[in-house]
Image: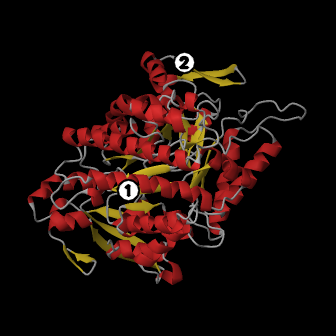
Amino acid sequence: MFEPTDFGKQIFEERYAFNDGKETWEEACSRVAKFVAVAEKNGLVKPYYGAFYEELVSNRFCPGGRIWYGSARPKPSLLNCFVLSSPADSREGWGQLVYDGIVVLGNGGGVGCNMSSIRPRGSEIRGHRGTATGAVSLMQIMNSVGEVIQAGGSRRTALLFCLNHDHPDIEEFLDVKLNKKQLTNANISVAFTNESLDSFLKKVDKDELHDLVWGGEVKKQISAREMWKKIIDNSVENGEPGILNTWLANRENNTYFCASLNSSNPCGELFLSGEEACCLGSLVLPRFVTSEGKLDRRQLARTIHLAVRFLDNVLDVNTYPLNKIEETTKKFRRIGLGVMGLHDMLIMLGKKYSSEEALEFVNWLFSFIKHKSYEASLFLAAEKGQFPAMDRDKFIESGFCHRLKESIRENILRTGMRNCTTMTCPPTGTTSIISGVTSGIEPMYSYAYRRRWRQDGQTAERIIEHPLFTKLKNTNKVELFESTLEIPIERHLAMQATIQKHVDSSISKTLCVPHTCTAEEVEPIIRKYVGKIKGLTLYRDGSRGSSPIESLSLEEAMKLECRSGSCEL
């Protein structure tokens, strides 16, 4: 049985435990398993309560934080993030988006939205004497909504605004955060929607003009090279904008025949159609490495099947903030099974994160997870029925489904799928701390780090050593450890691109680069991989001022003495 310790125990008690933090780990696992198992029928509640409990208490599977927090509360809200439809270009459309945003953000959810449906700044408003204020002005309104919700005591607001790369307001959009210091409560991303990134980059290479289009008309032409340069320069300078490869997301889209994808959720791990929600949970990968340093494939397969069933049940026991979100979410039954602790697993198996050997293993691992999760959804479809929007003949013709085994494709035609997607790679922030492992598919931030935070008006500080480093730092496996800034930039993106081939949704991954890194250094590497992944976020160390986390060097970490959860140099 797993038990959170040290900082992980503190986070669990502060964020997710009932009874003012007094609920034990076992009690919380029982509460969540029992609540989610209620969705079962035909006498299966008790058996699946036991099966779910076993996966949770052993920490082989870890649901998203909202599931831990919300299970068994009145009106439980178990889903993390939402994508709202692009608003209608009218006063009523703007008002509807603001209303929906207030409800969803006030309910603790994050919101992503593509604002490209809004006519560009300066456009004539027929029937009125005036001109349109453009897409960015609606973003500013939504940003203010987020600020008010946050000031009212809600959780930290999570907003993502994206704009298509050929929208006439794209230049204003690229300047609004870095130069004008606006949209401070939101992340922003450029969505490459109407052409592939490869096609756009050919324009960049040839220094061609890029058309900005509205209503089927070219409103303006700008330099493709200058636009691309600004995207990269701004990302290196301040971490934004991100890049959304919406063209690739739709080419791979399993629901292409009835719903397009135009935005991701705020963390980027799921592209969704309008009025859809994230249903997230992760495999804790180190739990499947035996004491002999081998992968337990049988247990991994069993956990995948139970995790898919668990997440599918969450869709039925959840309370939704809006009826239209419930309707759309249950129409597609999209779930996102991810991972955490990938770097820990690689070290335990004797592989270095940045090595070619690690890439080869990860390619196999995610192919295994992909096929087992689809197999689990097939079994659920046979038992409980396929997702309502399912068209079997069209489903297997999606870009993603063409990479499935033929046996899986044949079974999809026989039974359908319970879920339109099964996988993603979420960031797993606090849940990975609770589990004592690295976040998502990210490499280890550092062997150890100094964390600072405000507490009772004072600055508190604590040195935290990564649990696996504590265990192995006096063994020959210490040479396998690498921090995120020590890993070459290209290996970060090679890992993301390798995994993306097997993930039907998207991946939350931050390309962390050293403070000394320049746009000229990073641009050719981004260009090499950006067409193969669905999203890219870059963060240059220190680009947003002082960080609450300060990395320690390997030499400093080796000298640490840790007792009772406290570390000292």
Marks 2 and 1, the one that precedes in the sequence: 2
2 or 1: mark nearer the eye: 1
Disc number for residue 303:
1
Task: Give the image location of residue 243, x and y in percent.
Answer: 48, 38
**Can residue 59 be seen in this snapshot?**
yes
Of the 4 image quadrants, the one containing the N terminus is bottom left
**What is the quadrant of the C terminus in the image?**
bottom left
The way the protein has been coloured in the rendering is secondary structure
**Relative to residue 530, is residue 142 depicted above or below?**
below
Q: Is residue 350 above or below residue 56?
A: above
Residue occupied by mark 2: 209
Which residue type carries mark 2?
Leu
* Mark 2 burial class by Cα count in 10 Å: few <14, some 14-19, many 20+: some
- Residue for point 56% across, 32% down: 392
In the picture as drawn, the residue positioned furthest to the left comes out as 476
SS label for mark 1: helix
Q: Is residue 205 left or right of residue 483?
A: right
Q: Position of residue 532 (x, y in %)?
A: 40, 31
CA distance for labels 2 and 1:
52 Å
Residue 411 picture location, percent across and down: 47, 35
At x 34%, y 39%, the residue is 367
| Amino acid on which disc 1 is placed | Thr
**Between 325 and 429, the one nearer to me in the picture:** 325
Q: Residues within 10 Å of mark 1 (few under 14, many from 20)?
A: many
> Is 369 drawn above or below residue 213 in the view shown?
below
View extreme (right): residue:
127
Quarter of the figure with residue 154: bottom right
On screen, residue 552 above or below 241:
below
Q: Residue at x 64, y 53 (%)?
A: 143
Horizontal and vertical percent position of residue 454? 45, 74
Q: Is residue 181 visible?
A: no
